[in-house]
Image (tube, coloured by chain):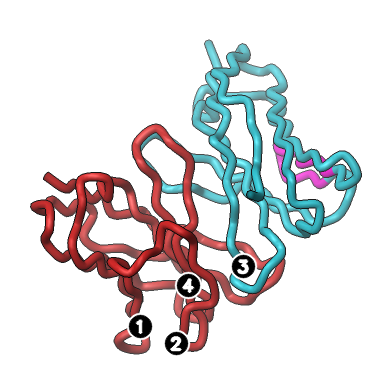
Chain colours: A red, B cyan
Amino acid sequence: EPEVTQTPSHQVTQMGQEVILRCVPISNHLYFYWYRQILGQKVEFLVSFYNNEISEKSEIFDDQFSVERPDGSNFTLKIRSTKLEDSAMYFCASSEALGTDTQYFGPGTRLTVL
Amino acid sequence: QKEVEQNSGPLSVPEGAIASLNCTYSDRGSQSFFWYRQYSGKSPELIMSIYSNGDKEDGRFTAQLNKASQYVSLLIRDSQPSDSATYLCAVHNTGGGNKLTFGTGTQLKVEL
């Protein structure tokens, strides 16, 4: 069964450093998302992406965040200057279509900012 | 602010019993509703989706939707210890980006 994959599974970085989290969505899906979950808190929407542009972004997704689809398979989330409060699980998701379509989540990347 | 509310639990049920999980949402225009299961340290895994008022059954799981009351529920019949997890209610909000808004989740414990 096709699935969303994410790398790395765990990333440790120093405050102020840039990190890039990578995702490979399900191959026939056209819509891509990033969510995050701070330990013990709810899953929060960051951004959705379609046709090489951002469809919607949350208040969390400020100028330090960016997303890119650098090729036909990868979808990346870049955090330019990490802060302690960026420590969280970051989940990539994809869906085949908009509207009612189900979003399938990857296994996540645990980001630890020291 | 569009909200999704769930009782955080823990909800404890004996093995073989029915577990009932509830969720309310604030965005009256929402059209799609999802239940995800999340084991500790893992990603959300889709259990069920529901789009129309009424019940939808899939194996041991039944989702119930009442849009007038802005209420979604999940019933798990014949609960098993492997069902012990956090159950997340997610609502697809109106708007252009297909954003899902999640509740905090209800922790379910199925006891032997």
Name the mark on residue A52. 2
Q: Which residue is mark 3?
A: B98
Residue B40 locus on image (x, y percent) = 39, 34
Nearest the eye: B33 or A80? A80
In the image, B74: left or right of A19? right
Within 10 Å of disc 3 (Cα), the crowding (few <14, some 14-19, many 20+) is many
Amino acid type, mark 3: Asn
- The chain containing the residue under callout 4 comes to A
Q: Nearer the viewer, mark 2 or mark 4?
A: 2
Amino acid type, mark 4: Phe
Residue A106 quadrant = bottom left
Mark-to-mark CA distance, 2 and 1: 7 Å
In the image, B63: left or right of B12? right
Name the mark on residue A32. 4
Q: Which region is colored magenta?
A: B56-65
Residue A42 locus on image (x, y percent) = 48, 40
Disc nearer the start of the sequence (2/1): 2
Name the mark on residue A69. 1
Residue A105 visible at all: yes
Residue A1 visible at all: no
Mark-to-mark CA distance, 4 and 1: 10 Å
- The chain containing the residue under callout 1 comes to A
Amino acid type, mark 2: Asn
Amino acid type, mark 1: Arg
Within 10 Å of disc 1 (Cα), the crowding (few <14, some 14-19, many 20+) is some
Is residue B64 found inside the magenta-colored segment of the image?
Answer: yes
- The chain containing the residue under callout 3 comes to B
- The chain containing the residue under callout 2 comes to A
Name the mark on residue B34. none
